[in-house]
């Protein structure tokens, strides 16, 4: 029997669903001042969309995609990442036909068949941004700044920005040749996947999770020695502007990122606090030069990043960064007979129209269970309605904070409560 959630997935309820929405709302509000507009694409795409973007030798495509044939035998894939779908949408809908830089963001679930562990799930949510149409290093800096601001506004301090350049196409080609030459003598000490990567894209070897501490990888040639003058200057300008904005970073020559499409700037924010998530990437991104062209669009560049919402939530939870999220009950209405329950429904409706959070009891006519309910939900006010109150139109209103009690005419209750809250 399998009435259990699928391995690597999570249910969010109570505090956790509130936390998820808190992060989402904060992020949306911060990002709105940068001019990003939201793109909502389908959760699934034709498989080719992801194969074209991530590259057919990437881990995502070879091992991690949830791919299936639909009833018409089309190969469909649950999206493992956001960039490919946004580029597909951008090109298909000719969003490039109007002038200017285009700034987009997305928020939603991604699916990868990865080995579940702390901070790694098979369904997880990403927030990401993509900007098309400009190849300025200052745009890269602003993109990084926006992620930095999101994290600092959420109170996350223990993270480290790692940044590198993988150069333009010429730099990458020279580097790939140098890596091929170097690894030719060390093939025996590489994992079986890296042997395949050697043939298809040797830069991927540097991104291997299995071989990451292998001496051979640590001593491999570095991209910085193969950069063209333009790429060097580009990267220096990114770093200079980051310095100027006082965004701390560490240049990491080993950072190459797993996907085929990156060029020039690549970066990651890594969790650095003393907790079980230390060392995990919280956000990753970079610039890509020819992805839009590869999808049949014009030759315009893009830059973007994505962060994992669950990882943000994990770190905020262990570092106690969430405010109280559960809404406090403003009013509990206690009713002493069935007609009073109807009056209670009517009053609750009016109070809620005035933005007050109201709870009531639907079943009990006795005081005792209803005061038990009050103990549990801890309202700021308790209103009691019985036959006498209904006949006189004057209700008893208890203030549970000051522990005082007033008789208030029903039409004045809203004002009386709102004045005090
Ligand atoms: P990527 O698309 O692989 O560059 O990942 C971007 C970000 O998404 C990472 O830095 C993580 O925060 C998050 N992420 C990626 N894979 C997972 C996963 N399996 N579970 C949870 N978060 C993930």
Image (spheres, helix red, strand yellow):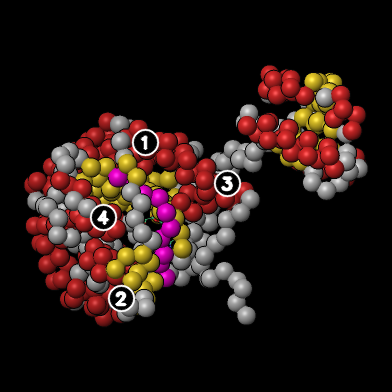
Q: Which residue is mark 3?
A: 18
In space, the residues marked 1 and 4 are separated at their CA atoms by: 21 Å
Q: Position of residue 164 (x, y in %)?
A: 25, 50
Q: Position of residue 57 (x, y in %)?
A: 25, 72
Q: Is residue 330 above or below residue 228?
A: above
Q: Residue at x 21, y 37 (%)?
A: 138
Tag 3 near tag 4, CB within 8 Å: no
Q: Nearer the viewer, mark 2 or mark 1?
A: 2
Number of other residues with Cα within 10 Å of mark 3, as a class: few under 14, some 14 to 19, many 20 or more:
some
Query: From where the camera sits, is residue 253 visible?
Result: no
- In this view of the protein, which residue sits in the foreground, 220 or 6? 6
In space, the residues marked 3 and 2 are separated at their CA atoms by: 38 Å
Determine if the magenta segment contains residue 107: yes
Disc 3 is placed on an element classified as helix
Say the numbered circle drawn on residue 205.
none
Q: Nearer the viewer, mark 3 or mark 4?
A: 4
The quadrant of the picture showing ligand 1 is bottom left
In space, the residues marked 3 and 4 are separated at their CA atoms by: 31 Å
Tag 3 near tag 2, CB within 8 Å: no
Q: Which residue is mark 4?
A: 89
Q: What's drawn in magenta, residue-wise?
A: 104-113
Determine if the magenta segment contains residue 203: no
Q: Is mark 4 within 8 Å of ligand 1?
A: no
Q: Nearer the viewer, mark 1 or mark 4?
A: 4
Q: Which residue is mark 1?
A: 32
3 or 4: tag closer to the N-terminus: 3
Disc 1 is placed on an element classified as helix
């Amino acid at each position: 029997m399998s009435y259990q959630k699928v391995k690597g997935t999570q249910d969010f309820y109570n505090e956790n669903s509130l936390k998820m929405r808190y992060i989402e709302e904060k992020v949306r509000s911060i990002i709105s001042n940068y001019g990003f507009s939201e793109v909502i694409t389908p959760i699934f795409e034709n498989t080719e969309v992801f194969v074209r973007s991530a590259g057919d030798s990437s881990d995502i495509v070879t091992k991690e995609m949830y791919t299936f044939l639909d009833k018409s035998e089309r190969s469909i894939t649950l999206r493992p990442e956001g960039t490919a779908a946004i580029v597909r949408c951008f090109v298909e809908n000719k969003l490039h036909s109007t002038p200017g830089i285009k700034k987009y963001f997305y928020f939603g679930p991604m699916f990868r068949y990865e080995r579940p562990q702390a901070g790694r799930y098979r369904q997880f949510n990403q927030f990401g941004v993509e900007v098309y149409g400009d190849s300025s290093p200052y745009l890269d800096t602003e993109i990084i700044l926006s992620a930095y601001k999101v994290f600092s506004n959420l109170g996350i301090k223990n993270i480290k920005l790692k940044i590198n350049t993988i150069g333009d196409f010429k730099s990458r080609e020279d580097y790939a040749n140098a890596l091929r030459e170097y690894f030719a003598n060390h093939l025996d000490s590489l994992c079986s996947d890296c042997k395949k990567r050697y043939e298809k894209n040797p830069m991927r070897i540097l991104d291997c999770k299995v071989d990451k501490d292998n001496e051979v990888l640590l001593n491999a040639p570095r991209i910085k020695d193969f950069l063209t003058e333009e790429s060097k200057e580009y990267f220096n300008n990114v770093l200079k502007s980051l310095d100027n904005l006082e965004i701390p970073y560490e240049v990491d020559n080993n950072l190459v990122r797993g996907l085929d499409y990156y060029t020039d700037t690549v970066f990651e924010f890594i969790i650095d606090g003393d907790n079980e998530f230390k060392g995990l990437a919280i956000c990753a991104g970079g610039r890509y030069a020819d992805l839009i062209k590869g999808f049949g669009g014009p030759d315009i560049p893009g830059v973007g990043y994505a962060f994992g919402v669950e990882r943000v939530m994990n770190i905020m939870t262990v570092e106690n960064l969430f405010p109280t999220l559960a809404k406090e009950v403003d009013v509990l209405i206690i009713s002493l007979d069935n007609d009073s329950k109807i009056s209670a429904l009517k009053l609750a409706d009016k109070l809620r129209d005035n933005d007050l959070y109201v709870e009531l009891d639907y079943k009990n006519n006795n005081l005792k269970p209803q005061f038990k309910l009050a103990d549990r939900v801890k309202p700021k006010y308790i209103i009691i309605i019985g036959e006498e109150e209904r006949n006189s139109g004057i209700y008893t209103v208890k203030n549970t904070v000051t522990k005082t009690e007033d008789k208030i005419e029903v039409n004045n209750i809203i004002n009386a409560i709102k004045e005090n809250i």
